[in-house]
Amino acid sequence: MFTTEYLDLPPLTSAGGSVQLPGSKSISNRVLLLSALSEGTTEVRDLLASDDTRVMLDALRQIGCEVREDADAVRITGLGAKAPNSPARLFLGNAGTAMRPLTAALALLSGDFELSGVARMHERPIGDLIDALRQLGCKIDYLGNEGFPPLHIRHGDGLPSLALSAPIRVRGDVSSQFLTALLMALPLVAKSQDIVIDVVGELISRPYIHITLELLARFGIVVQRDDNWQRFTIAAGSRYVSPGVVHVEADASSASYFIALGAIAPASDGHEGIRVLGVGQDSIQGDIRFVEAARAMGAEISSGPNWLQIRRGAWPLKAIDMDCNHIPDAAMTLAVMALYADGTTTLRNIASWRVKETDRIAAMATEGRKLGALIEEGPDYLKITPPPSPADWKAASIHTYDDHRVAMCFSLAAFNPAGLPVRIEDPRCVAKTFPDYFEALFGVTTARAGQIPVICIDGPTASGKGTVAAEVARRLGYRFLDSGAMYRITAYAATQAGLIIDATHEARIAELARALPVHFDEGKIWLHKQEVTNAIRTEEAGMNASKVSALPLVRLALVDLQHSFQRLPGLVADGRDMGTVIFPNAPLKVFLTASAECRAERRYKQLISKGISANISDLRADLEARDARDANRSVAPMKPAQDALVLDNSRLSVDEAVDQVIGWWRARQPFGA
Ligand SMILES: O=C(O)C1=C[C@@H](OP(=O)(O)O)[C@@H](O)[C@H](O)C1
Ligand SMILES: C=C(OP(=O)(O)O)C(=O)O
């Protein structure tokens, strides 16, 4: 997951390959709650692991369910007839699928509960649900604003007697989750009589009620509904029966980004477009109907029981005019596809967007306009006209409003015909439903050669370039190449193979270097199956690295390996010849240096802190000798590239040096400072 302040996407050109999507949020949180209300243990496979399911799992633990999270499944032992632990204060983040159904379930049990969420959750309506529960006799107070969380359920003295004989009326035109909440909770009290729910007004987001009914059926609850989706009847004697094992299908709303990707991007060489795995034509999720909308815009889509295959068809895409009430979440993705269409696209009947993670109508309009589109925003619709020509596209920094879908949607703007990068602010917000979204995106997209940015940080030994480069990479979410480690590892491998590091063994060492089985894994360095992180950091390993790096054939052998690190979304490469030889076209080259005195002192402190004794003047003599060898070797001598910015960090802290490099980098981006 990217947790950086922003993530810059370079212009993307093609896409191809398979994506295994994470589990459906709507199914996951329903299955968790139903398991919690059942007796016995339910094994949930392929559960979504994200912020929304995390808050649900935490809440279930707090009220007394046993939750075991194993590698193969999550196992929930439900409350059955047991009363929930109380009092309890539950924090439900911004998960509508946790807040609304848990409110209803806890209101029909005994106990004292407070339910709260993030600030935005306290702006998302829940009044229609509370009205319905109060009609029944439940005692619920608002702790903040009337009609919104946080809430207090006051059943500490036991469940009050409930008025169950009259139909329970609930409004359906603000969120379908209120009806879902009642449908999942009322079987708790449907003992001796049928319970009837009447929907007042139009029921929006209807396919989500279908998911609810499907899953209730799997847990043994039969609900009858009339043809108009206005009246729902829960049978007397209802009892939640765990199905034992439940498989969660992949998220159809998350699929929309990859369906759109396949529709927008030319297929990468050797690929038939994008294959989405985990969800297919038989999905119980309404958002699978996004497929029809994408087809109407020109995508070529084939599908099977658990997969979708998407290719670009009509190009530009075809503008559409569509009622999107049945696919409220996936329809946001249409707003971004509309940027690539041949005219004005109208998305209608989307008023519910205004009360979701943010006011999504306003957000999509504001951010779309930043890219150069012409957007008309109405109370319940959007009309989107793409930028008239490639030259009218603008490089934009997309504000994401802590809304996962805004972030995921606008990542697709990186295919703009102007070849401009796109900045996504706060990319971490995708954690609500798809923590590894950007990794998945980068796994199937390509940029034009040379368009993946590289920041080179070269400099002499002990200048702090490794520390600075690693931190710059971390702050930008870029990959990190410690090229010095390549030489250290090669020297280490040569020594292990019994080779003396000198010109007579050059060809043999180069051969070793060409097939170096090195991999980097969370700060650790591996040579085949041996961890060499510390072994290559000794002074002796440094000296050997310097010797090995003076051998021209070895340097040549390591070039391809180093180039292979230039992958999306970008690279920070540290070494001695990154800017001069390996990435001569890098858009930012920094030569980081410090006085010999200062570097010797840093190295001294580093060694002493590791418990290794050292002598400062010997260290200084060593590093000056190394400087001389690095600067005078025949191939790729260490020197600042002509277009490098020199940064003497003798008097700078690590943070100050990092800030300077990032400052230079930001100044070169088209987004403004
Ligand atoms: O029941 C559900 O799982 C959901 C219902 C929809 O909300 P509304 O009914 O509020 O439109 C949808 O937007 C949300 O992401 C999930
Ligand atoms: C509206 C959404 O979430 P929630 O389940 O919190 O309503 C969403 O995921 O787009």
Image (cartoon, rainbow, N blue to C red):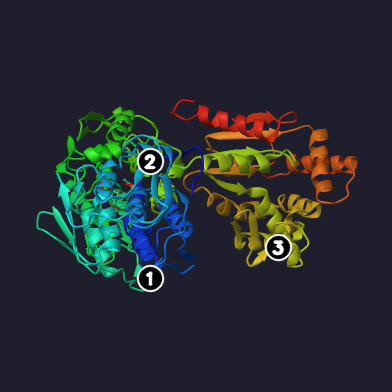
Which is more toward the observer, 224 or 133?
133
Asked if the beta carbon under badge 2 is closer than 8 A to the nearest atom of ligand 2, the reply is no
Question: In which image quadrant can residue 106 be found?
Answer: bottom left
Residue 403 at what x, y percent from top left? Answer: 38, 41
Task: Work out whether mark 2 precedes mark 3 in sequence or the reverse, and give the earlier one.
Answer: 2
Task: Work out whether mark 1 precedes mark 2 in sequence or the reverse, and give the earlier one.
Answer: 1
- Give the residue type that dot 3 points to: Ala
Q: Is residue 456 visible?
A: yes
Left or right: 496 as drawn, with respect to 338: right
Q: Is residue 590 above or below residue 237?
A: above
Residue 91 at what x, y percent from top left? Answer: 45, 47
Residue pointed to by mark 2: 121
User: Residue drawn at (74%, 66%), measured in percent from left and top?
Assistant: 496
Residue 230 at what x, y percent from top left? Answer: 13, 52
Crowd tier of the residue under label 1, counting other residues whose Cα lies within 10 Å: few below 14, some 14–19, many 20 or above: some
Left or right: 16 as drawn, with respect to 513: left
